Image (spheres, rainbow, N blue to C red):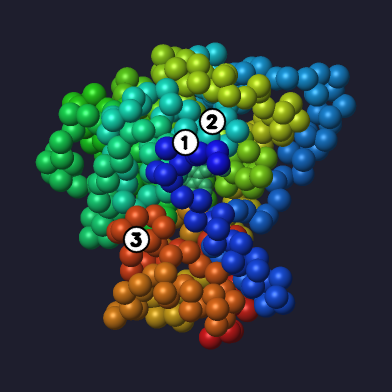
Amino acid sequence: MITLANRLNTVEEYYFSSKLREVRQLAAEGNPVINMGIGSPDLSPAQDVIDAMIDAMKDENAHQYQSYQGLPELRSGIADFYHNNYGVALNPMTEILPLMGSKEGIMHISLAFLNEGDHVLIPNPGYPTYTSVTNLVGAVPVYYDLKETSNWEPDFDALEQLDLSKVKIMWIGYPHMPTGARGSLSLFEKLIAFAKKHSILLVNDNPYSFVLNDNPMSLLQVEGAKEVAMELNSLSKTFNMAGWRVGTVLGSAACIDAVLKVKSNMDSGMFFGIQKGAIAALKSDKSWFDGMNAIYKRRRVLTEQLAEKLNCKVYKEGVGLFVWAKLPEGITSSEAFIDKILHEKYIFITPGTIFGSNGEGYVRFALCVKEEKVQEAIDRF
Ligand SMILES: Cc1ncc(COP(=O)(O)O)c(C=O)c1O
């Protein structure tokens, strides 16, 4: 009998990895499943992005290992994107590292900065990977509450009450997933001040700022942010490239260097064609965002109707790729609620509980379903 590493006792298979098996099984049995669970954009990247990838295949260097730091042209494309969209200046040589999706960055940052036993501040509710990665590296998750009554923003008095002596990293993400809370520059300023006061590395996970959001923000807009902060960004949702696996991490040269030390020991560069496609995507103009958001807006209107048909109360201020909604009065279990809908109506929505205990009583609908399918879901009730 080969024994497993102890660290595997600290994590479970990712919720979607197991739940989607159940959803697929229902579909394989011939049921008309509508999947509003996972936030995987169903729309295509722009044609010039696809063309750039195809053209790249003919380049004689296309099939070799690529630079650990990504093509210089990709890094300067990311720098231009940050400058044009967020007004943030980054040195493409030292302050930007392309990633194969921002998800891997959560692991690389954790491996670069955490020792066993270090504490990590994690939003509740929040993206489940912060917890699993923290556990995998032997650090300790310490949850901080986000509540609807505080517009899903942290309560700084409550944060100050915590024992922060062992806290090394704090994860945040605005626009927030799963709720869609926007955050604000003043919130970012307070968070940077908090991080500086307690010598905490503050990391903003920022994949949703261009979806249904008229005011994209970066944590790095705050004066002096790079002294204590890093940011993850992603092309997955912004450019419909989730399966391509392209993201980036931004921060001071010293922080990026630390992450590169980990990452360069794990992979051997990103496929050339994907980098070329990403470079083209990053050059997209306003018409790309307007076109994408017009579609998401129509879907959001219908999805809100669906949520309301289920007597859920929609968090209307939300931005990003999801509709977040509160269960009807008297219904207490998000998982029981979504299971009933899955098995009776064949519609899969995500229970708020997978994002933490403060997600109990809420559900999340992804806007990755075509309008006619959302209409069909409405018609099933
Ligand atoms: C909050 C959050 N962070 C990170 C990711 C990972 O995105 P990527 O595709 O860039 O790895 C997701 C994906 O759903 C997400 O919701």
Name the element at disc 1: loop
The kind of secondary structure element at disc 3 is helix
Dot 1 or dot 3: first in sequence order is 1
What is the crowding at mark 1: few (fewer than 14 residues within 10 Å), some, or many (at least 20)?
A: few
Which residue: 28% across, 29% down? 118
* Mark 1 / mark 2, whichever is N-terminal: 1
Foreground disc of the pair 1, 3? 1
Q: In the image, is residue 32 above or below residue 272?
A: below
Residue type marked 1: Ala
Report the Cα–Cα distance between label 2 and label 3: 28 Å
Q: State the residue in front, 25 or 97.
A: 25
What residue is disc 1 on? 5
Residue 317 is labelled as: none
Mark 2 or mark 3: name the one nearer the start of the chain. Answer: 2
Q: Amino acid at mark 2?
A: Thr
Q: Nearer the viewer, mark 2 or mark 3?
A: 3
Q: The disc labelled 3 sits on which kind of residue?
A: Gly
Q: Quadrant of the N terminus?
A: top right
For label 2, the residue is 248
Can see residue 224?
yes
**Tag count:** 3
Q: Position of residue 244 (x, y in %)?
A: 67, 40
Q: Say if 323 sits above or below 118 in the image.
A: below
The image quarter in which residue 328 lies: bottom left
Measure the alpha-carbon separation of dots 1 and 2: 30 Å
User: 172 or 135, which lies in front?
Assistant: 135
Give 313 or 63, whichever is nearer the viewer: 63
Seen in the image, is 243 located left or right of residue 367? right
Q: Which mark is residue 359?
A: 3
Alpha carbon distance from label 1 to label 3 = 30 Å
The x, y position of residue 139, in whole percent, is: 33, 33
Q: Residues within 10 Å of mark 2 (few under 14, many from 20)?
A: many
